[in-house]
Amino acid sequence: RKLLMDVSGCSREAQNSRARRYEEVGGGRTMQPACAEVRSRASLPVNSAAPGLATPHCMEALEDVPLLLAELRPGQAQQFDWKSCCETWSVAFSPDGTWFAWSQGHCIVKLIPWPLRNTKLISKAFDHKSCYVKPSEVRSRRSSLKEKTLDCGQIVWGLSFSFSPLLNQKMFWATSKAQEPCSDLSCLILATGLNDGHIKVWEVETGCLLFNLSGHLDVVRDLSFAPNGSLILVSASRDKTLRIWDLKKDGKQIQVLSGHKQWIYCCSISPDCSMLCSTAGENSVLLWSMRSYTLIRKLEGHQSTVVSCDFSPDSALLATASYDTCVIMWDPYTGDKLREFCHISLLPALDYGTSDDQLRSLRSLCFSPEGLHLATVADDRCLRIWALELKAPVAFAPVTNGLCCTYFSQGGIIATGTRDGHVQFWTAPRVLASLKHQCRQALRRFLTTYQVLALPIPRKMQEFLTYRTF
């Protein structure tokens, strides 16, 4: 009872005060696009963040409950079509933090300028006015950005952003030649994975279709661009293959990776572009070399389907989430299991035909930009935020029917997508990384685990640098 009072009994003034801390990362003022409905966080029950909680170790963790900054909802429901569905299977922030992509269902992707105040919006979520002012050069650039709608023609499952060099006019499809390509030295592009096995690649600022890649025989479930800007794109499909595409070579398919025996759910390229991780409807995780496109190793430890994976910002850690209700943190270089985060159900089973494990099945995870936190979405209607050095969540938020989650590229905000086609933006813990953690990250960006272990340094320092200790 005391816990619920702690969660729900804070005053409006206190809530607004905490919300102001997040204005500087683009979430301070939430507004309403013409295409979507935004719900005020004041209209949502805060105490639903952790109903039924009774575990003592959660008391301290919930001192900083994530605030709901905004909720985007699809506009008027479209006429029923067997090709369409309303789920938001994927959401993504652009690497530079200027765009948000929302697969809102019904074959539509919304491209929304970030922060939200720069679109055709009405402020609803907060009573106070933002006192934060962007630098003039940033403000002038973002004021010219306009919300866009991409009609992909098929259900959209995967999204991935990347920057590209100036694309040649000949790459544009004939139907898009009337529009001018991006005039900057580099263009922001968005790849969309579709239900029919095709991949459509779009230029974000103009909405032009650049490529329509074909090769997969079933749903393209996930996409991942190489973070180094090489325009190498990896696609994961229900046809049990991963395919590598080179957009610099007019979208040529350069490799097909086979090894999974079930549908592939997720793929992720390490930030140093040396490894590729893939997860499927099986207990194991496959690690591939991005240099030779060969299998490096198979990671075994989960007891059920592995549905999501993500590398830490320094590539030294790999996190995988499974229907077995656990997140495992691996050393991708050695295959060692470093830590396991187990999800304890916070809600009583409402359906007698549903097991407790099914209620806690994980759907998605992602690392925070500073590499100190993990966010997970599970079927028990909770978004959890974990600190890597702890085995218990440090924050909870209510996310019903959650399917995906992602961090804002500069931290401080998490976006979640749901089966209802909604997107919610939550505040996330923002911490100043210690100097020793920053030094560890700087070293691990170019040193593998084996190279660290070969250094003539004390054992305790080796354990710290390889994340055996925190």
Image (tube, grey):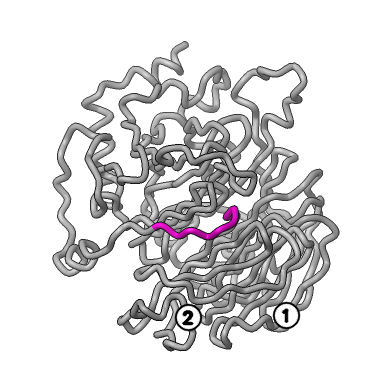
Residue drawn where x is 48% and y is 25% of the image: 59
In this orientation, which residue lies closer to the viewer: 292 or 120? Answer: 120
Residue sticking out furthest to the top: 1
Residue drawn where x is 40% and y is 61% of the image: 435
Please indicate whether residue 224 sits to the left or right of residue 101 in the image. Answer: right
Residue sticking out furthest to the right: 261
Please indicate whether residue 239 sits to the left or right of residue 157 in the image. Answer: right
Real-space Cα separation, disc 1 to disc 2, in angstroms: 27 Å
Q: What element carries label 2?
A: helix
In this orientation, which residue lies closer to the viewer: 237 or 369? Answer: 237
- The kind of residue on which mark 2 rests is Ala
Residue 458 visible in rendering: no
User: Percent x, y for residue 376?
Assistant: 57, 43
Q: How crowded is mark 1: few (under 14 residues within 10 Å), some or many (20 or more)?
A: some
Magenta region, residue range: 149-157
Q: Identify the residue position indicated by label 1 in the image.
A: 255
Report which quarter residue 62 is drawn in.
top left
Residue 254 visible in rendering: yes
Please indicate whether residue 342 sits to the left or right of residue 73 in the image. Answer: right
Q: Identify the residue position indicated by label 2 in the image.
A: 174
Numbered tag placed on residue 417 in the rendering: none
Residue 384 inside the magenta-drawn segment: no
Q: In this view, does 129 lie above or below 468?
A: above
Q: Residues within 10 Å of mark 2 (few under 14, many from 20)?
A: few
Residue drawn where x is 53% and y is 47% of the image: 105
Choose the circle earlier in sequence order: 1 or 2: 2
User: Percent x, y for residue 168?
Assistant: 43, 88
Residue 156 inside the magenta-drawn segment: yes
Residue drawn where x is 31% and y is 81% of the image: 184
- The kind of residue on which mark 1 rests is Gln
